[in-house]
């Protein structure tokens, strides 16, 4: 690859590092896949940023657009701003974006339909995010639950935030786990050699499993009421 292109990639990475933003937040707000800008900075492809992304990114980073490309920049005029540039004006360093996963975690017998894709995003102020969890935004995944085994703590249709960096039973709490029957949200009580899988609904029996028999996807750090008013 041309040395000039590599130089631009390194420069953009440095600008983003100094800005306080992260790659995925910028890419999402500019209408791209969460990994788009990181791949541009760290990999050979894409070789250059899409023009509308470059313009929006220059506005966010408050730099001359020419700094983001090795090619001459074509002038553009007021009134012809792209959708990405308009989105950029609403993004600040104090925003956090959380991935919403296209999956439903069962609070009953368990299901397994967690595709490796993001179906949407939820944006909120960083100060609000930090009041909820000390986790990193890229580690928090949001998904809907179904079933009644965790009532009254979690009701059918509620949303949970799952911290996937906490994928071991570090303490008693509610976790997203993968059982033989699929994904489930359950309360775990960890012992030295086994884990008790509990339901908050007394209609369900406890299950005891040896450590290593279940896969812990992450710990539930927040529950959002998903019921209509």
Image: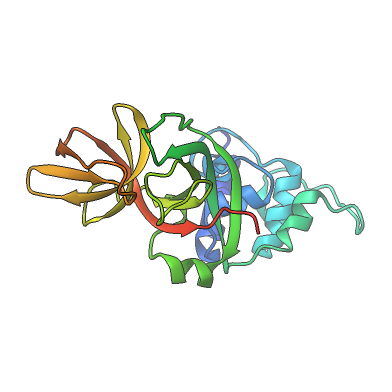
Q: Quadrant of the N terminus?
A: top right
Residue 73 against residue 112 in the figure, above or below: below
**What percent of the width, then of the height, locates residue 45?**
57, 33
Q: Quadrant of residue 212?
A: top left
**What percent of the width, then of the height, locates residue 113?**
46, 29
Residue at coordinates 66% horizontally, 62% vertically from top-left?
91
Foreground residue among 114 and 57: 114
Left or right for 171, reference 186: left
Foreground residue among 219 and 15: 219
- Residue furthest out toward the front: 203
- Residue furthest out toward the top: 180
Residue 112 against residue 98 in the figure, above or below: above
Foreground residue among 161 and 153: 153
**What percent of the width, then of the height, locates residue 79?**
92, 57
Left or right for 201, reference 208: right
Tell me which colouring the rendered structure shows.
rainbow
**What percent of the width, then of the height, locates residue 204?**
30, 42
């Amino acid at each position: 690859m041309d040395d000039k292109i590599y130089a631009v990639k390194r420069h953009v990475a440095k600008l983003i590092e100094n800005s306080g933003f992260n790659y995925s937040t910028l890419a999402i707000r500019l209408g791209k896949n969460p990994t788009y800008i990181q791949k541009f900075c760290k990999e050979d492809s894409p070789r250059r940023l899409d023009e509308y992304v470059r313009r929006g990114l220059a506005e966010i980073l408050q730099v001359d657009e020419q700094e983001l490309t090795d090619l001459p920049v074509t002038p553009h005029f007021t009134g012809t701003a792209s959708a990405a540039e308009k989105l950029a004006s609403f993004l600040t360093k104090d925003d956090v974006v959380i991935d919403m996963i296209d999956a439903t975690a069962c609070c009953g017998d368990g299901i397994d339909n967690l595709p490796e894709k993001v179906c949407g995003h939820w944006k909120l102020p960083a100060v609000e995010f930090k009041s909820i969890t000390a986790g990193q935004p890229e580690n928090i995944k949001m998904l809907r639950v179904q079933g009644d085994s965790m009532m009254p703590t979690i009701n059918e249709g509620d949303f949970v935030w799952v911290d996937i960096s906490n994928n071991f039973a570090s303490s008693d709490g509610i976790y997203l786990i993968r059982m033989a029957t699929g994904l489930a949200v359950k309360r775990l009580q960890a012992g030295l050699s086994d884990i008790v899988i509990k339901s908050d609904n007394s209609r369900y029996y406890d299950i005891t499993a040896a450590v290593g028999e279940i896969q812990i996807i992450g710990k539930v750090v927040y529950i959002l009421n998903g019921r209509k008013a």
